[in-house]
Amino acid sequence: MDSETFPEELADALVGVQRLIRRRLRAGLTVPRLRGAEVELLRLVETRPGIGVSEAAKELHLAGNSVSTLVNQLVRDGYLLRETDPADRRAARLLLTRAAETRMRDWHERRTALVRGQLDRLDEADRQALCAAIPALLRLADNLHEEADRP
């Protein structure tokens, strides 16, 4: 490992894998595709049902008005429900619709099948190396997230 080129090579590999997964998954879509930020918001609401708009903006590192725009689009398209927070009538809580739940479930299944198929093409040593790298990649993501939260 060349310590000078490793950071760039790692970043390029991660971006390349993500881009190719996204492209392959788009190819099989039978519904209009969602933009990246829309998918990120749906994934966040999927993992944190009832999250508020301002908390979602903070989690996604986006401006509140940008998330409000995304919410409005996803509500209009039938993927999000915006309910009034009983504790604060001025605030909204976000929930997935059945259509969004179905779409997200399909996306997860297709992504898992795609990645599983590609992992099956690798030899055992490569699969073990990728498996061993997951904790370090998760810590890297946590560090990036924490750093983005600092003022």
Image (cartoon, rainbow, N blue to C red):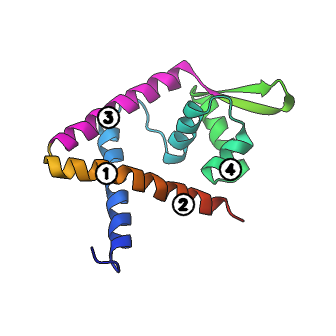
Q: What is the x, y in percent for residue 135?
A: 41, 51
Residue 150 location, quadrant: bottom right
Residue type for callout 3: Thr
Mark 2 vs mark 3, CA separation in Å: 25 Å
Does residue 9 sit above or below 36 in this rendering? below
Does residue 26 sit above or below 103 in this rendering? below
Dots 1, 2 in contact, CB < 8 A: no
Q: Which of the numbered marks, if any, corresponds to residue 112?
A: 3
| Mark 4, secondary structure of its residue | helix
Q: Residue at x 56, y 33 (%)?
A: 47
Q: Quadrant of the C terminus?
A: bottom right
Q: Extreme bottom residue here?
A: 4
Mark 1 surroundings: few (<14), some (14-19) or many (≥20) residues within 10 A? few
Tell me which label, 1 or 2, sits earlier in the chain: 1
Mark 4 vs mark 1, CA separation in Å: 31 Å
Q: Is residue 105 visible?
A: yes
Q: Which residue is mark 4?
A: 58
Q: What is the x, y in percent for residue 28?
A: 30, 34
Mark 4 vs mark 3, CA separation in Å: 28 Å
Tell me which label, 2 or 3, sits earlier in the chain: 3
Q: Extreme top residue here?
A: 98
Mark 2 surroundings: few (<14), some (14-19) or many (≥20) residues within 10 A? few
Tell me which label, 4 or 1, sits earlier in the chain: 4
> What residue span does the magenta drawing correspond to?
95-120
Q: In screen coordinates, is 50 left or right of 18? A: right
Residue 113 location, quadrant: top left
Q: What is the x, y in percent for residue 131?
A: 30, 47
Q: Which residue is mark 1?
A: 132
Tell me which label, 4 or 3, sits earlier in the chain: 4
Residue type for callout 1: Ala
Q: Residue at x 37, y 50 (%)?
A: 134
Q: Which residue is mark 2?
A: 144
